[in-house]
């Protein structure tokens, strides 16, 4: 039987949503093209993300190169640790994920080292799935695409495995942009790359993909969110650590989840709420969506808490499409170490703090004549001493490897009280990270329906009982937003049709014209690509300058004037105008 | 003296438009980051391009991977010919463009081969500009970034040097999408890469950049454009081949330019008009823009005509930002050859054509018994013969290398008349190709003004005579579209300010809040980043629920109600509402 993935892909290829890349040259696994409708669908998904995170939350978008230099990925750990275990057939030289080949023999093959995987392969005498040949030793294959910047191969470059590093590397600039105030955030929507060993899951596992990521820098001492009260009543499907133990997903209000310690804190919970809002707005079915908490052993060692948004797919089961993590100060510390620069924020106290401080005051009148050119160095060494090191009659310091003893009377010291107005802190990072391609595929799958169409069409035999394919896409996501259909392909009907097209285009609506075949066929063609509104020009149009607007989902029709039709349709698509109100 | 590039870059870096990439790690030439304001500015430029080419012209956007496989770039010629001549210092190992080093010694150094450049370097004893060392022989350095797809280095990948190839490779799919009808077009906005030897022109020459390209497939026999009459009166600065001979740019209407044969045909001229419209809409100064025709020796051998849109920059002079070419059938033929697939369109004639056709009819009753198993091959060889080869008493054919003679009575032939309904043709390609980064930089430069501000600000001393920097960006391009400024940083004024922000965000307006410093300073901060409208909440707001809206360019203010302010500002930005009409 054909599964839903096949149905959706058949439609997607036929109508121009998704195509295999490089098809003309036989194709290459792990790459997909967005065709005319797919690219527009994806743009609209990205724009909704932008509307939520950039416009409404105020986390400005930045754009940094997709090629990165080596330092970045040494700091991030990708040079050292971003790899999958690979084993190659000694006979046909096909490469495989070693952990995938032993998944029936081991509980958690992805936790095994290359050596352990080699041992499992030997013990079980695993052969090449393609030709039955002997498999070689497993080794770690780095998944970054490598290249070289400029001539001579002197400067390594990597295609970024995630957009996130851009925000960390630009931290000092961003901090200034936001005038040194926490919290602030920056986002990126762009390409990321992962040189998969042998991708076999179609659009779900791509070597080149689009991420939308936000890195939000917050004060580690305050993980509340100022707008949390707006979302605390939102009820979501949570599949917590505890729930996973018993296999139970619970519907819980976010406020309660934070209060009960299920979600670590308000800020993370607020990000879950934004994610939930975004996924529903682009057209993911709420009942096919859950938020799964990472288990303790699955979470990165530095993470304070981490949740994945998962979407149910007919073929692939629950698929991770978003990761939302509290990454603490891990990333900034790593880049501070690699770059030898301080990445922190000066945070002023509400009121100054008084702190007691031990101060050493060397007597330069004595030290100067005694040590001459070395006197300054000796003084600095003395200043660095702690109280207990100054307790004896003689004080010892080491200068340029030489031990020097100084009489205690040449050094004064005291404990003073100082006013401190603030301190440098390393922000924590909250990261919601979205896989735009998986989301785009998922919403296609969730909006795909085959159903019996009971539709009465004027001037045609009733088409009831016919099977129709319909993409029930939200109207602000549908690639083609309106179709203009002259009832017959005649000049007198095409002319007002063209006039309507021009009006709609002026307000930015993507409109298609179709005058070939029966009107019923044309409705079907538009249902199939999710066009929410079809506008038909008929002979009444010539009399009273009105047209019919047909609603894709209900197949109902209303009669509306050509005058102001652009605003009428705009309001239907973007401003929640009800379909009935669009009619006269 | 500081030039305009420095002024603009200083502002761009300080306020978050453009940053050097990887600054934290010392930076790398040829890469720039778009900061929070720059990325938003660039998005808006891209969206206007999309509005013109995708929404209004109907050339759908597609999105293909930035990594391409080798076949594509063999076909396109990039593997063989996309290179610059490189010479390396033997002492310090710095690499240089060989043609750049000899530009004072030769007329057209970019036309010289590597061998010729080596000879010029020797003859003139050119030394390394960095250390004075001896330079090595020049050789051609390929400018594509190379990588490897999957493990084992078996499959070469290249970062695409242009987005255009995606549309050619997808030609068969696009043709089906457009239901086999010419003309049709597809576009891409995305990253392209060029591994420059040693880029030294800041944002003008990048190793990673964004292109917006359209490939429009047209019938080679008909290069008119159905909407040409809409643009034939548009007057543009044309710097034609003839004009370049005399150094003269002429203002000519497009209709006239086509009629006089200055521009090859209507379709190309229409693309010039769209380009002109786009550049003006995003904020390029019309008087700093010209269209320069490629000289005959500069044009690709296959091109029918080619024009560059050039923008005048203070530091760099006339900079190419768009190329508009009639590439004929070069690209499709190249991919057809490389892929061994036919890339053509079946075009039906208006009415069937009658053609006379010579047909050979071998008598199988005779040939069968005579040649047995070979009979079919003999018959096929006979069918391939031309009329004159059948004139003798004996007919000779070659089958499997063997010459065979056949009596003429065993072969009948005749000339018949056949009806032909259409033919397969290879479309020609019109390509407008835009460099988005250069355009974005140019419009920053063109909108940058330093001027004396004569502005009266309530509750403050008059700030007349003060120097203000202002970016006179078109309001639909400005990254921050509105600023909300409570006159004083007090809760009672901040509260209505927040309410206004929420209203504006709901309709997708990017709004900034600023309550620090005098209102005059805050106006200046917003002038500098091009915010078109500043909304000030004052004590009158608390009485009558009105605010002031200030226009960036004129510094005039009107009083407007908070009610419906979102639509008021939306119409100012997007619908050409006059500023006076925004007030009560």
Image (tube, coloured by chain):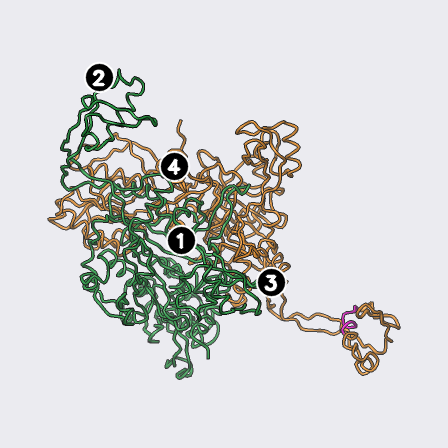
Chain colours: A orange, B green
Which structural element holds mark 3?
loop
Where is residue A112 drawn, in percent x and y?
Answer: 64, 37
The mark lying in front, picked from 1 and 3, is 1
Where is residue A250 drawn, in percent x and y?
Answer: 51, 39
Q: Which residue carries the number 3 mark?
A: A343
Q: Nearer the viewer, residue B132 or A496?
A: B132
Read off the magenta span: A380-386
CA–CA distance between discs 1 and 3?
Answer: 37 Å
> Which class describes the residues within 10 Å of circle 1: few (<14), some (14-19), or many (20+)?
many
| Residue A222 visible within the image | yes
Q: Is residue B505 left or right of residue A300?
A: left
Q: Which residue carries the number 1 mark?
A: B162
Does label 2 or label 1 sit earlier along the sequence? 1
Q: Residue at x 54, y 34 (%)?
A: A94
Does label 4 or label 3 sit earlier along the sequence? 4
Q: Which residue carries the number 2 mark?
A: B365
Q: Which residue carries the number 4 mark?
A: A9
Chain identifier of the residue bearing label 3 in the image: A
CA–CA distance between discs 4 and 3?
Answer: 46 Å
Q: Residue at x 64, y 62 (%)?
A: A340
Which structural element holds mark 4?
helix
């Amino acid at each position: 039987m054909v599964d839903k993935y096949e149905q959706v892909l058949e439609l997607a290829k036929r109508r121009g949503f998704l195509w295999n890349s490089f098809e003309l040259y036989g194709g290459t696994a792990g790459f997909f093209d967005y065709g005319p409708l797919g690219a527009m669908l994806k743009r609209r998904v990205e724009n909704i993300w932008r509307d939520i995170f950039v416009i409404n939350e105020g986390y400005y978008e930045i754009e940094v190169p997709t090629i990165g230099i080596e330092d970045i990925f040494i700091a991030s750990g990708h040079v050292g640790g971003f790899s999958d275990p690979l084993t190659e057939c000694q006979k046909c030289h096909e490469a495989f994920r070693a952990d995938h080949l032993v998944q029936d023999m081991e509980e958690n093959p992805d936790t095994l080292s290359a050596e352990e995987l080699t041992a499992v392969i030997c013990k079980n005498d695993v052969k090449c799935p393609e030709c039955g040949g002997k498999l070689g030793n497993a080794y770690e294959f780095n998944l970054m695409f490598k290249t070289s910047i400029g001539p001579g191969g002197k400067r390594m470059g990597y295609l970024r495995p995630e957009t996130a590093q851009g925000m960390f590397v630009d931290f000092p600039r961003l901090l200034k942009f936001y005038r040194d105030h926490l919290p602030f955030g920056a986002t990126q929507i762009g390409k990321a790359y992962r040189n998969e060993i042998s991708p076999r899951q179609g659009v779900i596992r791509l070597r080149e993909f689009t991420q939308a990521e936000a890195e939000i820098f917050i004060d580690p001492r305050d993980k509340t969110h100022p707008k949390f009260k707006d979302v605390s009543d939102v009820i979501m499907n949570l599949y917590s650590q505890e729930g996973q133990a018993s296999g139970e997903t619970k519907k819980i209000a976010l406020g309660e989840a934070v209060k009960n310690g299920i979600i670590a804190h308000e800020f993370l919970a607020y990000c879950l709420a934004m994610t939930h809002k975004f996924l529903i707005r682009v057209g993911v079915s709420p009942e096919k969506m859950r938020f799964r908490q990472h288990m303790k052993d699955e979470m990165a060692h530095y993470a304070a808490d981490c949740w994945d948004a998962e979407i149910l797919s007919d073929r692939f089961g629950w698929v991770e499409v978003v990761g939302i993590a509290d990454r603490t100060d891990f990333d900034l510390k790593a880049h501070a170490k690699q770059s030898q620069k301080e990445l922190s924020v000066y945070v002023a106290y509400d009121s100054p703090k008084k702190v007691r401080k031990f101060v050493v005051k060397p007597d330069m009148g004595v030290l100067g004549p005694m040590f001459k050119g070395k006197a300054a160095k000796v003084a600095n060494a003395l200043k660095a001493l702690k109280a207990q090191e100054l307790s004896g009659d003689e004080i010892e310091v080491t200068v340029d490897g030489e031990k020097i003893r100084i009489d205690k009377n040449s050094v004064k010291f005291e404990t003073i009280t100082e006013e401190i107005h603030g301190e440098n802190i390393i922000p924590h990072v909250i990261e919601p990270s979205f896989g735009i391609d998986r989301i785009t595929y998922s919403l296609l799958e969730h909006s795909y329906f085959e159903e019996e169409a009971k539709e009465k069409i004027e001037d045609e035999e009733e088409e009831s009982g016919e099977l129709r394919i319909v993409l029930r896409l939200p109207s602000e996501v549908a690639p083609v937003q309106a179709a203009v259909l002259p009832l017959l392909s005649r000049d007198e009907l095409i002319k007002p049709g063209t006039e309507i097209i021009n009006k709609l285009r002026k307000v930015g609506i993507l409109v298609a014209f179709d005058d070939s075949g029966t009107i019923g066929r044309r409705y079907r063609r538009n249902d199939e690509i999710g066009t929410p509104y079809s506008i038909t020009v008929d002979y009444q149009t010539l009399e009273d300058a009105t047209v019919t607007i047909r609603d894709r989902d209900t197949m109902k029709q209303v009669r509306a004037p050509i005058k102001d039709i652009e605003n009428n349709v705009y309001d239907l698509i973007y401003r929640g105008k009800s379909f009935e109100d669009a009619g006269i």
